[in-house]
Image (cartoon, rainbow, N blue to C red):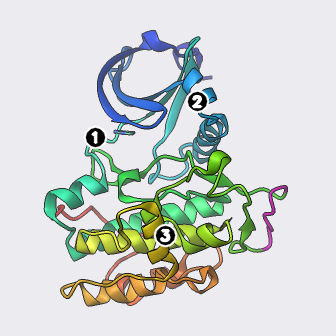
Amino acid sequence: MPPAEEVRRRSHSDYIFGKVLGEGSFSTVYLAKDVHTSKEHAIKVVEKAHVIREKKTESVMREKEVLRILGNSCPYFVRLYWTFQDTDRLYFVLSYAKNGDVLGQIEKHGRLSIDCTRYYLAELILGLEHLHSKNIIHRDLKPENLLFDENWHILITDFGSAKILTSENGHNNESSTIDVPEKEYPYKRRNSFVGTAQFVSPEMLTETHSSYASDLWALGCIAFQMASGHMPFTGGSEYLIFQKILKLEYTFPEDFPREIKALVEKLIVLEPQKRLGTSDERKYSSIRQHPFFTVLNWDDLGPPPKIS
Ligand code: ADE
């Protein structure tokens, strides 16, 4: 039996709330200190009325469910320690990612070095292998959602757009790469777009399908951005970005590293079934075996390279 303190329900008074770490459309993340242990956490505070008004209840519930499923089973995900609520708000007590996010480091250094790009893509791939093995698609992977913990390891966050595949919603347990009809996505009520335009896969725009391969498209976009400092698909409006995605209209800068280019070209592929990794079972062995990663030991990535 754990000590009584560990099983007791938590509340606002168990934490000293500090600075705002981030603001979402219906939540605010605060730095907070556990008054009993002095451990620092990020607490996501969600306004109930706002969530109901914006019809985001499902997304909030899904985020909690995904975090519950992930638990403490993989080091590359933000962990949910506690949840509690008061009359007006929901509280998610999460791991505190002390070192900001991947976007912040890309902006600080202009781009990431080849070694950093390789290392952090590898952590992301290990995370995705785990997530997909739990039948979950993230659907909003982007550098802002890849946080850094105190030891400069990646913590994947923000599961508000995630999809948990079940036999009821079309998941075929015999195949891990099947496309799942997702009629409600990405256009939800009132045609509002869910996810992030620059990283959305073509099939989510045309067929309103999402599959594990949609996360592999985003992986390709993230690899492009880490190595170049820029997103592959940009434009003055969401519509213009979508047009470019559907036409695969993107170009590599002159100085883009050749070995990463070969990988990106196998991930940013219009047909989901043709993306690298989609025919793999359980582990993304074809991605692991790509020449860009030959110098890595996938069983022990070792310490992170100094960010540059
Ligand atoms: N911003 C949003 N979530 C965060 C977290 N878990 N840690 C640090 N900053 C964050």
**Picture layout, residue 211 above or below residue 146:** below
Q: Count up the numbered dots.
A: 3
- Image location of residue 114, percent across then percent down: 23, 76
Q: Amino acid at mark 1?
A: Lys
Tell which circle, 2 or 1, labels the residue nearer the N-terminal end. Answer: 2
Residue topped by disc 3 = 242
Residue topped by disc 2 = 51
Q: Amino acid at mark 3?
A: Phe
Tell which circle, 1 or 3, labels the residue nearer the N-terminal end. Answer: 1
Tell which circle, 2 or 3, labels the residue nearer the N-terminal end. Answer: 2
Q: Nearer the viewer, residue 54 or 9?
A: 54
Q: Is residue 300 visible?
A: no
Between disc 2 and disc 1, the foreground one is: 2
The segment highlighted magenta reads: 168-174
Which quadrant is home to the N terminus? Answer: top right
- Image location of residue 103, percent across then percent down: 29, 56
Q: Residues within 10 Å of mark 2 (few under 14, many from 20)?
A: some
- State the predominant SS element of the stretch in magenta: loop
Between disc 2 and disc 3, the foreground one is: 3
Question: Within 8 Å: ligand 1 and the Cβ of disc 3?
Answer: no
Write down which quadrant ligand 1 falls in.
top left
Q: Amino acid at mark 2?
A: Val
Please tell me whether residue 193 belongs to the stretch shown in magenta: no
Residue at 52% over, 72% down? 216
Q: Left or right of 280: which side holds 158? A: left
Q: Left or right of 229: which side holds 235? A: right
Q: Nearer the viewer, residue 171 or 307?
A: 171
Please tell me whether residue 172 belongs to the stretch shown in magenta: yes
Return the mark for residue 98. 1
